[in-house]
Image (tube, rainbow, N blue to C red):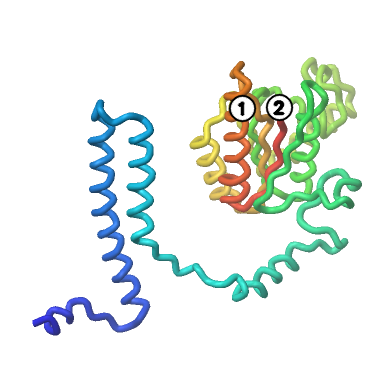
Amino acid sequence: QYIELSSYAARETLEEYMMSVKEVVTMAYKRDMHGTLNAIDRDCINPEVDLRTLEKRVREGVNKVTEKYIIDDDMHSDGEDIEDLYEEIESDRNDDGTFGIPTIFPSLTKLGLVHERGEMIMVNAAYKVGKSTLLLNEFTDKLNLGMSCIYHDTEMSNKLFAIRMLANLTGIPQDQIKSGRLSKTENESLKSVISWLKKQKYKHIYAPNFNEVEIYNQYKEFMYRYGDNIMGYYDYFKSNDKDTSRNYNILGIQANFMKNEIAGGLQIPILCAAQ
């Protein structure tokens, strides 16, 4: 009878067996995790369970179930991948001997400070000393290199950013762009830059409050539309909390998210500012 019933589980290849096993294990994992979470749910509404006990039961319960069902086909020696990894390193080299995406500043590039996929560079400086100007210079430089750019801004609206960008690219002072007091040459220059910008792939997002879900979804949508040859900017990390300890934690969470979830998780270079 056992042999007869086994025919229902029979598969033609090892790969098919592995897929079947994963399905069975997944359902078993869900069943056990469901039971564990139900027990935790009961503890959450039990007034006799204190915070320390609840935290311990959550951590130990979830970890116990997870460890029971570890299946990782990718757990192998990195020695098997070293040749492929070195080929990736070689492909990231530039013709001039540099590595990654050079900054707009040749002196920094010579020192090895370049933008790399999966990495984040943070510029830290005091109030009103040029952090946003530096990021804007990098932003327009990468557009000139043909990259797509997404820029999250905690202070400037789209219109104010556009004024700064036009001033940066034309050399015309911002007050003249606002007032329209332009010479014929300046007006032609402005129109030429606007025509060029219309062909570029970039997005400026005014976001005064840090929202992880919105930022992640905006990056994913941008990548879906324009590919993965992109550069990301965040201007800038800040917190209005007056408590020093909480402020430290808030800023740490923001920086950690941009470094690990955006730069690392999506494999794109990020340039951020902080003060």
Is 89 rendered above or below residue 201? below
Other-residue count near label 1 (Cα within 10 Å), few / some / many at <14 / 14–19 / ≥20: some
**SS for callout 2:** helix
Q: Quadrant of residue 183?
A: top right
Q: Nearer the viewer, residue 20 or 246?
A: 246
Q: Nearer the viewer, residue 163 or 245?
A: 245
- Check contact, mark 2 vs mark 1: CB within 8 A: yes
Residue 179: x and y in percent read 79, 15
Residue name at image x 24 percent, y 29 percent: 45
The residue tagged 1 is: 206
Look at label 1 and name its amino acid.
Tyr
The residue tagged 2 is: 161
Other-residue count near label 2 (Cα within 10 Å), few / some / many at <14 / 14–19 / ≥20: some
In the picture, the quarter occupied by the C terminus is: top right
Residue 221: x and y in percent read 53, 44
**SS for callout 1:** strand
Which circle marks residue 271 in the picture? none
Q: CA distance from mark 2 to mark 1?
A: 9 Å
Q: Nearer the viewer, residue 117 or 77?
A: 77
Look at label 2 and name its amino acid.
Phe
Residue name at image x 75 percent, y 34 percent: 194
